[in-house]
Image (cartoon, helix red, strand yellow):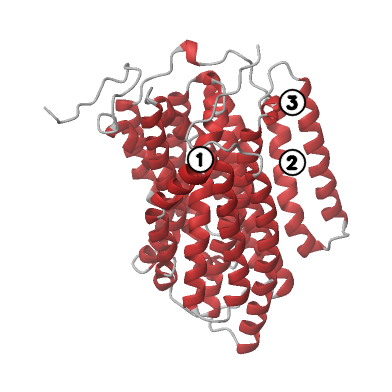
Amino acid sequence: MTTATLQTPTSRTYPSLRAAWIPLAALCLAFFVEMVDNTLLSIALPTIGRDLGGGTTALQWVTGAYSLTFGGLLLTAGSLADRLGRRRVLLIGLAAFGSVSLCVVLVSTAGELIALRAVLGIAAAAMAPITNSLVFRLFDDSALRMRAMTVMIVVGMSGFVLGPLLGGTALAHVGWEWLLVVNAPIALIACIGVRLGVPADRPEDLTSDRLDLPGAVLSVGAIGLACYSLTSGVEHGWLSTTTLASIIGAVVASVAFVWHERRSAAPMLDLRLFSNGTVRGAALAQIGTSIAMASVMFGLILHFQYAYGWSPVRAGLANLPMIVTMLLATPLSEWLARRFGHRIACLVGAACLAGALAGLSWGVDHGYAVIAACMVLMTIGLRTVMTICAVALVGAMPSNRTSIGAALNDTAQEVGSSVGTAVVGTLIAALVTSQLPAGTWTGDLVASFFHGERIIYALLAVLVGLITAGGALSLTNSHSVEEHPVEEAA
């Protein structure tokens, strides 16, 4: 018979993707919903701003609060999973994610929504690195691992891009609160699939090192204060006590984190791993790609709905070039990797990202066709760099540290997302307006917005190009999907 059957959850691995369809679908669903939630509310920002009375900064934090707690706690969640069990932590995260999402019906102010999003980010942090790590462990065969990881990455990236389209379509029929309520049944379905199909971790696959709580606190403090500094600069002035204190706090927390991790007997993140060029370069390149994706997603949502005056549905449909390219670019990305190797392929991707952002800098006031072309170019760059770097980074980790490896990959992406959203929101507030007006914009305000976008995307083209290319240069010339794992320290 050719019909695939599901192995019991006590089985170690699956012989094919078809045999693993239940756990693979459940893990993809869990990853999809957490990535969709990154951008799902972005299409509803104007509606939320009108309903809850939020300005530019508040709207920035509606999206940024999720990315901030998500990114800040990913390393901690990955560390917990490698100690307590990956399936156990994932099930707890899914349960919390679904339950907290239902609380949106009680929200009545922008501050309450920001707090809810922050808590959702905490729950999602217990899901993202574990889903990637468990997919990696469903198979022994390296080719199957690559295909499964590719499926996961495409699903996750598609979810990030599909968020505005799904949100815009839903807003035509229901209130924005339902964009979060729907998380509950999705999380429940994913829970059932994980419980039925994903094998429990064996004790020998986990680490017995104690949890590094000081490291977790310092990492969250460093990321949080750094992102808050950008907002505080506009709200209170760049030389104000609040802004300077935030900047100093971020620097101190970062230095303290490095100092502590170097001296800890059981560090949350073994910094010696960064001596491996693949780990170092892949993480850096992921930051660059996520800065590009988050900044463009946040900026263009405002562009389409405010400057163009489009409805949420039409603004969501405007992202179709990214969605289609995300699905169709796989053969091109794989060909680049096989033909030129990881380093050159990622450099090509970095050039696509920088070129797309430079094109947007010129094209924001030249019509949608130019913007769509830039979306396609940027997505090719995203698809190439993100896929190669994610697989290479997880493959370069010791066998009992795959969760922390996946967490490092996701942390790099979420740090980039937080920075990208913060930079665009801050610069719009500084260059255009700190309070987004309701209704139709005046011609002068639209012109001012276009001018601000040109400056923003030009700066991002340089920043993203340097970061992503710098990371790509540290990768190997491997033409395969496998990197040699670093030896685990005794």
* 477 left or right of 187 in image: right
Write the residue at 60% across / 58% down.
351
The vertical placement of 334 against 77, above or below, is: below
Task: Quadrant for the C terminus, please.
Answer: top right
- The reply to whether discs 2 and 1 touch (Cβ–Cβ < 8 Å) is no
Question: Whole-percent x and y of residue 243?
Answer: 82, 55
Image coordinates for residue 47, horizontal then vertical, percent: 50, 69
Q: Secondary structure at mark 3?
A: helix
**Do the residues bearing badges 3 and 2 touch, measured as CB atoms within 8 Å?**
no
- Structural crowding at the residue carrying mark 1, measured as other residues with C-alpha within 10 Å and reported as few (<14), some (14–19) or many (≥20): many
- In primary-sequence order, the first of circles 3 and 1 is 1
Q: Amino acid at mark 2?
A: Ala
The answer to whether residue 164 is seen in the rendering is yes
Marks 3 and 2 sit apart, C-alpha to C-alpha, by 14 Å
Residue sticking out furthest to the front: 339
Q: In the figure, 365 relative to 48: above or below? A: below
Q: Label 2 vs label 1: CA separation? A: 20 Å
Q: Which mark is residue 124?
A: 1
- In this view, the residue farthest toward the bottom is 443
Q: Earlier in the sequence, mark 3 or mark 2?
A: 2
- Alpha-carbon span between mark 3 and mark 1: 24 Å
Residue at mark 3: 261
